[in-house]
Image (cartoon, rainbow, N blue to C red):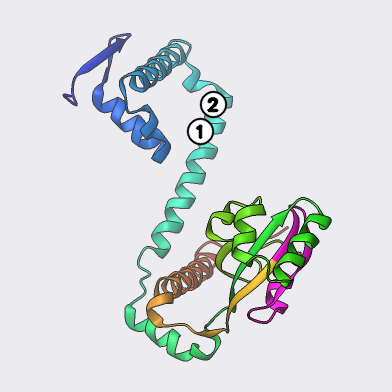
Amino acid sequence: MDQLQILAKVNGQPITSADLDAFIISMGPGGERYNNPEGRKMVLEQLINKKLFLADAAKNLYEYDPKFKAEFQRMKEEMLANFAIAKAVESVKVTDEEAKAFFEENKSELMSGETVNASHILVATEEEANEILAKINAGEISFEDAARAHSSCPSSEQGGNLGEFGRGQMVPEFDSACFEMAVGEIRGPVKTQFGFHLIKLNAKNEAKPIEFSEIADQIKQKLMSDKQQAAYRSKINQLKILFPVDIL
């Protein structure tokens, strides 16, 4: 579609396809749902309404209303202050060498957390959980087959396997049980807000050093934040010399 195609006029002021595109983009990812004939029609109506209110504002000289002028001044000052802050920190950069140096200096503290791999069977009552556990302990059925037959969790399709997870990723009662268990152990019933669980610990992975490639982006973000804060504080100190502050 021609970007300069005029779709409507309000009081002689045109609204083009480019105006619609810009409005949709300004909405961010959610704007994509309006990028279709029906959605663009809705956006066009919003732009028409906006033009109508602008025409009304111009006709009534709202631009000169004291309340508007005060609000406009407040917004202008807010935008100018934010722009000045951005200018104060815009030269801050973090190099790969700085990130690597930080990593080497703090390598001993940069560890991946302990993780476990566990499977579970989730049922509604303690009695049902104990009945299933008895059959598993007697060798009448495997834990995985019992999960497929009885567990109400979607993980039942994988024999109850929940995959690998770290501390704090599960509800507290379940989390505590998993990290206390030995590999191969079956424990339960464990009660949580979801019901009663039988838990089997498949694997336990101790905390280990993190490779630089795994954490490089996080290190750069931290260093960037630290540098920007330092630049901000330095600029504030300079400004206090230029523009004395008196706290009354």
Compare residues 128 and 12 and report the one nearer the observer: 128
- Point 69% across, 60% down: residue: 247
What's drawn in magenta, residue-wise? 175-198
Q: Residues within 10 Å of mark 2 (few under 14, many from 20)?
A: few
For the N terminus, the quadrant is top left
User: What amino acid is found at the position of numbered circle 2 in the picture?
Assistant: Phe
Compare residues 145 and 211 and report the one nearer the observer: 145
Where 137 sits versus 16, above or below?
A: below
- Point 40% across, 82% down: residue: 212
Q: Position of residue 226 (x, y in %)?
A: 49, 73
Looking at the rendered structure, the secondary structure element under dot 2 is helix
- Identify the image quadrant of residue 126: bottom right
Find disc 2 in the rendering and name its residue.
Answer: 68
Number of numbered discs visible in the structure rendering? 2
Find disc 1 in the rendering and name its residue.
Answer: 72
Confirm whether residue 83 shows in the render: yes
Check whether the beta carbons of the residues at disc 2 and disc 1 lie within 8 A of each other.
yes
- Identify the image quadrant of residue 248: bottom right
Q: Residues within 10 Å of mark 1 (few under 14, many from 20)?
A: few
User: What amino acid is found at the position of numbered circle 1 in the picture?
Assistant: Phe
Looking at the rendered structure, the secondary structure element under dot 1 is helix
